[in-house]
Amino acid sequence: MSKSDGSRYNATVTGREEINPELVVLRVQPDDTLFEFVPGQFTVLGLLGSEPRVPEADEDESPPRPDKLIRRAYSISSSSVERGYAEFIVTLVTSGELTPRLFALGYGSRIFLSPKATGVFTLDRVDSSKAAILIATGTGLAPYVSMLRTMLVNDAERRFVVLHGARYSWDLGYRGELESLARVRPNFTYIPSITRPAADPHFKGLTGRIQALIEQDLITERSDVPLDPAVADVFLCGNPAMIDIVKEMLVAKGFTPDQRGQVGTLHVEEYW
């Protein structure tokens, strides 16, 4: 890589945890001071087209120019109090442009990190007296991890509920951390579920799609937090198909989606 190309990078990978071969947590430290952000916001990561892809990735259908900076938005999963790095959880998309290159990174690798964060998928728009029901599939969990890591430290009153769906138990990123939080924080309930139990027989938790668990009123049963817009706001993040179905279910229960200039009781971030 030429010196001019390398100068387009402004951060370094300082941590890499492989949860499974297709799911990785990256910690990225900027060369300068990390931007301020609100838990739930996202930023942009980027790599040049000249960077290598992991062997298991598909070949580029249309290889990008070597000097092209491939950029994608990712929600931040680290606490906003953490000033040394920003953390991201990434799923390998074998046909994608960026994730096969992100998966090839190791400790000390250089990367582009946007100098700012953005987004309104944040808890500061919700009345502090209300519970927060945080529903996600896959890596849509990331903004909620940031919220919990930041807010559970000092907030022992507000009820937090995470309902997280994935295909297999090994796709339930941050599961160990969230289970530990649920044990020590009585105001936090963690509800994981998988959709392919036949291939994951050792998992003893809930099975079924998010919408089925909502129909069964599992959230109320496990947390004592009712799906009632007078009591709780709901956040949805993940697969657009899940979001469309659950959004329709919740609107029927009286939840109102955010509109331009008007905050509702149902907040959505499509993560695809």
Image: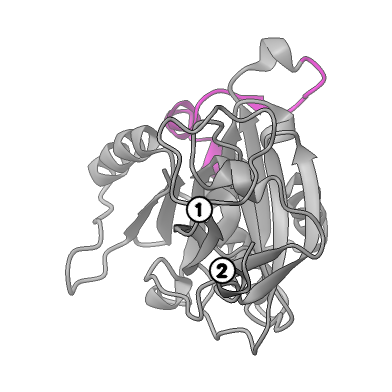
Earlier in the chain: of badge 2 and badge 1, it is: 2
Q: Label 2 is placed on what type of residue? A: Asp
Q: Label 1 is placed on what type of residue? A: Pro
Crowding at dot 2, Cα within 10 Å, few <14 / some 14-19 / many 20+, comes out as some
Q: Quickly name the residue at label 2.
A: 5
- Report the residue at 73% width, 61% height from top: 186
Q: Is residue 79 visible?
A: no
Quadrant showing the N terminus: bottom right
Range covered by the magenta-colored residues: 201-219
Placement of 172 over or under 59, stated as above or below: below
- Report the residue at 63% width, 59% height from top: 88
Q: What element carries label 1?
A: loop
In front of the other: 150 or 109:
109
- Report the residue at 39% width, 34% height from top: 242
Crowding at dot 1, Cα within 10 Å, few <14 / some 14-19 / many 20+, comes out as some
Placement of 36 over or under 157, stated as above or below: below
Q: Where is residue 54 in the image (x, y as percent from the top left)?
A: 68, 37
Q: Does the magenta stretch include residue 215?
A: yes
According to the image, what is the colour scheme of the structure? one colour
Q: Where is residue 176 in the image (x, y as percent from the top left)?
A: 81, 48
Placement of 230 over or under 152, stated as above or below: above
Q: Hey, which residue is sitting farthest front in the picture? A: 2
- Report the residue at 57% width, 65% height from top: 76
In front of the other: 130 or 8:
8
Task: Locate residue 266 relative to residue 216 in the image: left or right.
Answer: left
Q: Position of residue 27 (x, y in %)?
A: 72, 64
Q: Is mark 2 on a helix, strand or loop?
A: helix
Task: Locate residue 176 relative to residue 149 in the image: left or right.
Answer: right
Q: Is residue 129 magenta?
A: no
* Marks 2,1: beta carbons within 8 A: yes
Q: Position of residue 224 (x, y in %)?
A: 57, 50
Q: Quickly name the residue at label 1.
A: 66
